[in-house]
Image: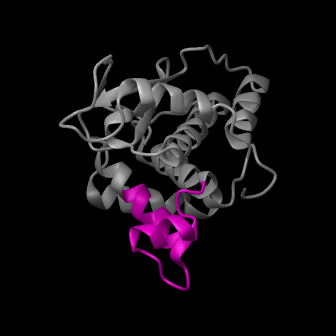
């Protein structure tokens, strides 16, 4: 999810006993940095002129029930208290790095604009593998035909619902108006990974 994650730094354990401890999460974040997709995205960000410091991806305890977030100038937040396993941490990092890449490459990128936010969410859900059939099967949301696009649409609308600048109707309109361009935009990948 791009934008505000309602995150707060924490060195403590987990919220209400759920999710990863901050120590476990930080270790998983470090392991995620070795993932080929994460390495590729970081390289592409740097090639695009965006500096990624050692603190660009950090673990936090988040108030909202989200896996993570991206914010210009702040970097990527991993919501440790809402994640349980390495795959989830890596998935959040990949998803949020796609938002960071979008922010880096677009001169006028503005997450307060519903269309910009929708486009980045379409790309992040599609390119990160958030809607891979195995993840959908695990969540019990799998259909035999069209599951990936339905999943992307569902995730985009969930994210836009947290944007105070996007009404429900405005979110749907924004998503549909940018769908073809953004769904087919695979940069920095040559094709959908």
Residue 66 position (above or below residue 47): below
Q: Quadrant location of residue 94?
A: top right
How many marks overall? 0
Q: Residue at x 36, y 36 (%)?
A: 20
Q: Residue at x 55, y 80 (%)?
A: 146
Q: Position of residue 66 (x, y in %)?
A: 34, 43
Residue 162 position (above or below residue 76): below
Q: Which residues are magenta?
A: 129-157
| Magenta segment main secondary structure | helix
Residue 176 position (above or below residue 166): below
Name the residue at the left extreme. 16
Viewer can see residue 123:
yes
**122 relative position to 160: left or right:** right
Q: Position of residue 19 (x, y in %)?
A: 32, 40
Q: Nearer the viewer, residue 91 or 153?
A: 91
Q: Quadrant location of residue 78?
A: top left
Q: Quadrant location of residue 148?
A: bottom right
Q: How is the image coloured?
A: one colour
**The N terminus: image quadrant:** top left
Magenta span includes 148: yes
Q: Position of residue 151 (x, y in %)?
A: 47, 67
**36 relative position to 2: left or right:** right
Q: Position of residue 163 (x, y in %)?
A: 31, 42
Magenta span includes 41: no
Q: Residue at x 53, y 54 (%)?
A: 125
**182 relative position to 62: left or right:** right
Name the residue at the bottom extreme. 144
**The C terminus: image quadrant:** bottom right
């Amino acid at each position: 999810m791009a934008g505000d994650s309602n995150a707060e730094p924490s060195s403590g354990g987990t919220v209400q006993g759920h999710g990863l401890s901050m120590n476990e999460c930080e270790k998983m974040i470090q392991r995620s940095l070795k993932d080929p997709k994460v390495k590729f995205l970081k390289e592409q960000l740097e090639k695009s002129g965006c500096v990624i410091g050692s603190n660009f991806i950090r673990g936090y305890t988040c108030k909202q029930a989200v896996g993570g977030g991206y914010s210009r100038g702040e970097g990527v937040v991993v919501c440790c208290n809402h994640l349980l396993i390495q795959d989830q941490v890596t998935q959040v990092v990949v998803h949020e790095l796609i938002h960071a890449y979008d922010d880096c490459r677009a001169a006028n990128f503005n997450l307060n604009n519903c269309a910009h936010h929708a486009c980045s969410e379409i790309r992040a859900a599609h390119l990160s593998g958030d809607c891979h059939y195995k993840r959908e099967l695990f969540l019990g949301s799998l259909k035999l035909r069209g599951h990936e696009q339905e999943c992307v649409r569902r995730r985009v609308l969930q994210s836009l619902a947290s944007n105070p600048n996007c009404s429900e109707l405005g979110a749907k309109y924004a998503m549909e108006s940018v769908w073809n361009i953004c769904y087919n935009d695979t940069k920095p990948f040559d094709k959908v990974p």
